[in-house]
Amino acid sequence: MYYELIIYPLFIVAILFSLYAQIKISSTYRKYSKFYTRAGRNATDIAKMMLSDAGVYDVFIGRVRGNLTDHFDPRSNTLALSDTTYASTSAAAIGVAAHEAGHAIQHAEGYFPIKLRGALVPVTSFASRMSWIFIMLGILITGFAYEASFGYYILLAGVGLFAVTTLFQLVTLPCEFNASKRAITAIRASGLYSDDEIHAAKAVLTAAAMTYIAATFASAVQLLRLLLIVTGRNNRRR
């Protein structure tokens, strides 16, 4: 069909972009995880400094196993830093820890995109589990002429659920960009780091941001494909 001329190239672009983003974050993090800063402050120190400067004192900073498993959990108000970040003085670790501290500050300040993202988490969890079940069931049922209308609505519900996951990806973008902006601003304002060290931390966060952009683009392309399938099935049942 005519839309395949658009969708398939977009799928190829999405796949290549995602692969590039994963390679970029891996290579950039690996490079700057060996670039140790001269101030002698480790990643945990920087996270504590950021939180203190923002007047946030109720966040627990803990350690979690793994590499690049760093995250902020608003449910327990815990900032978890990975084994490779927690005590490291590398530019990569400093950037990652400051980024996660940025999320903690967003939560404390009631930053609207992070509140919206939090509200979408339970809905998105359900949608991600059920969307493809509905979609595949809908496609199967629409194959029977006498059940075409029923199958169409099942399919439509599945696409609606998938749209929720795409929305979640979109809402995540400003949260990530803002956290990185807060991180670099705090690192620069501390006066502890040289321009090349700040540049290194920024390079890691920029590469990480690219993975979120790639995931959002891939989700949007998939949603477009599903909408075109729905349109085709709707025309067929008339």
Image: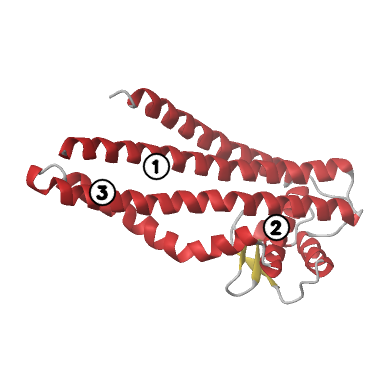
Q: Residue at x 69, y 65 (%)?
A: 104
Q: Nearer the viewer, mark 3 or mark 2?
A: 3
The reply to whether the C-beta atoms of the residues labelled 3 and 2 are less than 8 Å apart is no
Q: Residue at x 26, y 53 (%)?
A: 134
Name the amino acid type tagged 3: Leu
Q: Position of residue 33 (x, y in %)?
A: 72, 47
Q: Which residue was labeled with disc 1? A: 223
Name the amino acid type tagged 2: Thr
Question: Which numbered tag is attached to residue 155?
Answer: 3
Q: Nearer the viewer, mark 2 or mark 1?
A: 1
Q: Which residue was labeled with disc 2? A: 85
Using residue 44 as the reference point, say whether residue 76 is left or right of it. Answer: left
Name the amino acid type tagged 1: Leu
**Hey, which residue is sitting farthest right in the picture?**
191
Query: How far is mark 3 from mark 2, CA to CA?
Result: 44 Å
Using residue 88 as the reference point, say whether residue 84 is left or right of it. Answer: left
